[in-house]
Image (cartoon, rainbow, N blue to C red):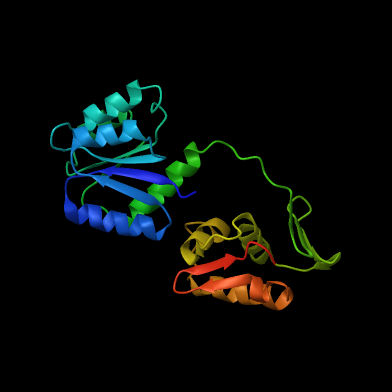
Amino acid sequence: MPKKIIMIEDEPDIIGLVTHYLEKEGYRVTAVRDGAKGLQQIKAGPPDLLILDLMLPEMDGLEICRRVRADSKTAALPIIMLTAKGEETDRVVGLEVGADDYLTKPFSPKELVARVKALLRRTAPPERPVAHYSYGDLSLDTERHEVSVKGKEVSLTAKEFGLLQQLLQNRGRVLTRDVLLDKVWGYDADVISRTVDVHIRRLREKIPLLQDAIQTVKPFGYKLKEEP
């Protein structure tokens, strides 16, 4: 399921820009322009992450943050605070009342997306790693770092192996090139999205089973069919 993000912000331009970038990464975004209504929205259905403006009508971001942290149901909710103020005291107060991260306006939407990804990774419960994946005649063993088809080993590079693992983990789901770059190459990697296309082509060439199983979803990225 896509991660749910609530954004409490009263500037329509910022709402539109941030929503566009986050939805492009696969997040589900709900925007609220009023502080009090935003708090009601959180209580009605806690999100996976909260983006919170400091200056809001009806109830400011600091008070919302205090109330979120005081409620046992939302006490651990990851919060990124936004503000037009740049003074150090504002940042300190925001962090002291419980914000996990802080961005000062104007900010880069790409930086915000990076902060969202990092915070969700940092606060996510540890997952039990899957050691083995099967897909028709294909087998992938993460512990041995081996891939085989009908028992015959297939030689893959580290990036090809990582790419195949992501596809197997998310079969049936569309994975954008940016998501694959983040998961396989790392967010800070100086890699262009065309590199993903090249590696997908190599996977299809090395494993004929994947030629039709890996579907191109233009203009976004790729998905592996549920069944081979």
> What residue is drawn where x is 62% and y is 70%?
214
> What residue is drawn where x is 40% and y is 45%?
4
Residue 99 appears in view: no
Q: Is residue 96 left or right of residue 209?
A: left
103 or 7: nearer the viewer: 7
> What residue is drawn where x is 73% and y is 76%?
208
Q: Looking at the picture, does residue 217 appear above or below residue 22?
A: below
Residue 211, horizontal then vertical, whole percent: 67, 76
State the residue lying farthest toward the left. 57
- Specify the quadrant that holds the C terminus: bottom right
Q: Is residue 35 left or right of residue 215?
A: left
Residue 86, horizontal then vertical, whole percent: 19, 42
Residue 139 appears in view: yes
Q: Looking at the picture, does residue 84 appear above or below residue 133?
A: above
Q: Quadrant of residue 158?
A: bottom right
Residue 173, horizontal then vertical, whole percent: 54, 60
Q: Number of marks in the image? A: 0
> What residue is drawn where x is 46% and y is 50%?
2
157 or 172: nearer the viewer: 172
Residue 73, horizontal then vertical, whole percent: 40, 25
Q: Is residue 41 left or right of residue 177?
A: left
Q: Is residue 174 left or right of residue 155?
A: left
Q: Looking at the picture, does residue 110 appear above or below residue 120?
A: below
Q: Quadrant of residue 140?
A: bottom right
